[in-house]
Amino acid sequence: MELISLTPFTLALAAGLVLLLGLLSLKLQLGLERRLLIAAVRSVVQLTLLGLVLKTLFEQSSLWSVMALAIFMLSVAGYEVMARQKRRFRGFWGIGVGTLSMFISSFSITLISLHFIIQVDPWYTPQYLIPLLGMLLGNTMSGIAISLDSLTHNAWQQRRAIEARLMLGHSWNQAINEIRRDALRAGLIPIINAMAAAGVVSLPGMMTGQILAGSPPLEAAKYQILILLLIAAGTGFGAITATMMGSRRLFDQRQRLRLERLSIKSH
């Protein structure tokens, strides 16, 4: 069966449902209608622009163009990690921890999968690299953001307990170890739940897209399994890297707790 093309009218019908939701938000005084409208407009504009950019990349298949887009995606993801935290690190560390963690995890796993698992030739083929990197960055970004937010929030809430452990002779690593473990658990729970529910409660997005595009269901399932496993690994490695870097940043060279290195997100 051929892929059914969507017309502007069909997209307008879907947009009408979102407008209806906005009217309900206004009626119920939820205060979400403006944010909902902005988010919907942004998604339309951003995805349309991405479609145009990818169309050009697919035609050229240039290494430098693909790398430029990949770096741009990483930079935006790093900013989003910082923006999702109530208490964030000041200065470079605010965006640097998340960005570096995603670079170490998502980029490395993407390259490994393209070289040794999927075996794409050339490895920077945009039809494979950009979607795979995008899915890894998106999910790793969420896991890292949750982990860092949990780490900084709980460190602030339990600052007296941490300082008491330090006075008892514990190292900085021992003083914050339990908080760091809780932060890692929080960051990994979403992807664990997604894997547990895949194929039973939910039909993952990539598999759905491939089936709609006409791919055999079993082949689509194999690709989705690969993606979920890669996302789980990327999220785990990224969250571990971010929490290790972030927890160390909360202490100075003399192993004193330095929460003034955090700033509170303004609303």
Image (spheres, rainbow, N blue to C red):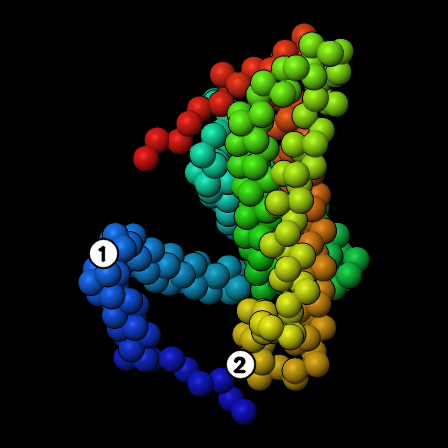
Nearer to the camera, 62 or 180: 180
Nearer to the camera, 64 or 155: 155
**Residue 68 in sight from this viewpoint:** no
Corner quadrant of residue 96: top right
Nearer to the camera, 111 or 17: 17
Q: CA distance from mark 2 to mark 1?
A: 38 Å
Q: Which mark is residue 29?
A: 1
Identified by mark 2, the residue type is Leu
**Residue 168 in sight from this viewpoint:** yes
Q: Which mark is residue 212?
A: 2
Residue 178 at x, y percent in the picture = 70, 32
Q: Residue at x 73, y 11 (%)?
A: 168
Q: Earlier in the sequence, mark 2 or mark 1?
A: 1
Residue 147 at x, y percent in the picture = 59, 40
Q: Where is 146 relative to 35, above or below? A: above
Q: Residue at x 77, y 61 (%)?
A: 117
Q: Residue at x 46, y 65 (%)?
A: 55
Residue 176 at x, y percent in the picture = 68, 25
Q: Where is 243 relative to 71, above or below? A: above
